[in-house]
Amino acid sequence: MDTKVWMYLVYLAVSIGLTVWVARALSRNGLVFLEEVFADERLARAVNSLLVVGFYLLNLGYVTVAMKHPDPVGSTAQAMEELSLKIGLVLLVLGALHFFNVFALGRYRRGRLRQLATHPPLAPVGRLPMQPAPPRPHPAAATGPHPGNPQPVGPRQPVGTQQPTGTHQPAGPTSPGPEAGPGTPPAR
């Protein structure tokens, strides 16, 4: 057999062997990563299978396209150089596909985690200044409810503490108890 044919056979054996080995390793070890990315075991297994099929198609397609060598191979040394170049390119394609998959899945995972986050990603740096409350009219300025002049809304006083204007009542019960006489001060 010609040296070029041997080169092709070795190239195919090594390239297909590397593709199968890398695909199995990625499938086995990547399933854990995919389960965490998708948070669903069934979906992770399905995506893992699809990624493996795509990986095989891309790699084996590249291996067969890159197999052709137009120049004649005259020596074993020249065949080895060409073989190492072709296998090196296959390894670069395998690595590029792997890093692209990890990058895309990592972005998807970050987006999903950002959606599930219940708190802001960063602590607030400062607070917005409080707007001052609008001034309220003084309750003593109102003369009473009139049809054209509604009573101003303000803080309410507890029941029993409002006093008519101009009178003064001592603190305590307003009516003496049954045992108290007319001149007896209220009990405290």
Image (cartoon, helix red, strand yellow):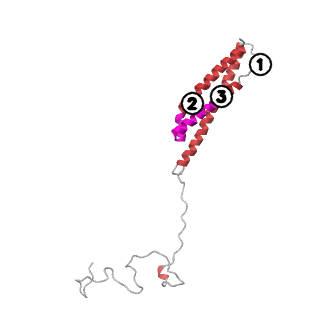
- Crowd band around label 1 with a 10 angstrom C-alpha radius: few (<14), some (14–19), many (20+): few
SS at mark 2? helix
In which image quadrant can residue 45 be found? top right
Image quadrant holding the N terminus, namely top right
The residue that disc 1 covers is: 71
Q: Give me the residue at 68% from left, 25% from top.
A: 63
Image quadrant holding the C terminus, namely bottom left
Q: Nearer the viewer, residue 132 or 94?
A: 94
- Residue 29, above or below 118: above
Task: Work out whether mark 1 precedes mark 2 in sequence or the reverse, and give the earlier one.
Answer: 2
- Crowd band around label 3 with a 10 angstrom C-alpha radius: few (<14), some (14–19), many (20+): many
Q: Position of residue 143 (x, y in %)?
A: 49, 85
- Residue 130, above or below 115: below
Task: Work out whether mark 1 precedes mark 3 in sequence or the reverse, and give the earlier one.
Answer: 3
| Dot 3 amino acid type | Asn
The residue that disc 3 covers is: 59
Q: Position of residue 57 (x, y in %)?
A: 65, 30
Residue 26 has which mark?
A: 2
Name the chief secondary structure element in magenta: helix
Residues at marks 1 and 2 touching, judged by CB atoms closer than 8 Å: no
Which of the two discs, 1 and 3, sits closer to the camera? Answer: 3
Task: Work out whether mark 2 precedes mark 3 in sequence or the reverse, and give the earlier one.
Answer: 2
Task: Check residue 50 for magenta coloring.
Answer: yes
Q: Give me the residue at 71% from left, 19% from top.
A: 82
Residue 80 in sight from this viewpoint: no
- Crowd band around label 2 with a 10 angstrom C-alpha radius: few (<14), some (14–19), many (20+): some
Q: Is residue 82 left or right of residue 175?
A: right
Q: Give me the residue at 53% from left, 64% from top.
A: 130
Q: Which residues are magenta?
A: 31-58
Residues at marks 1 and 3 touching, judged by CB atoms closer than 8 Å: no
Q: Farthest residue toward the left?
A: 179
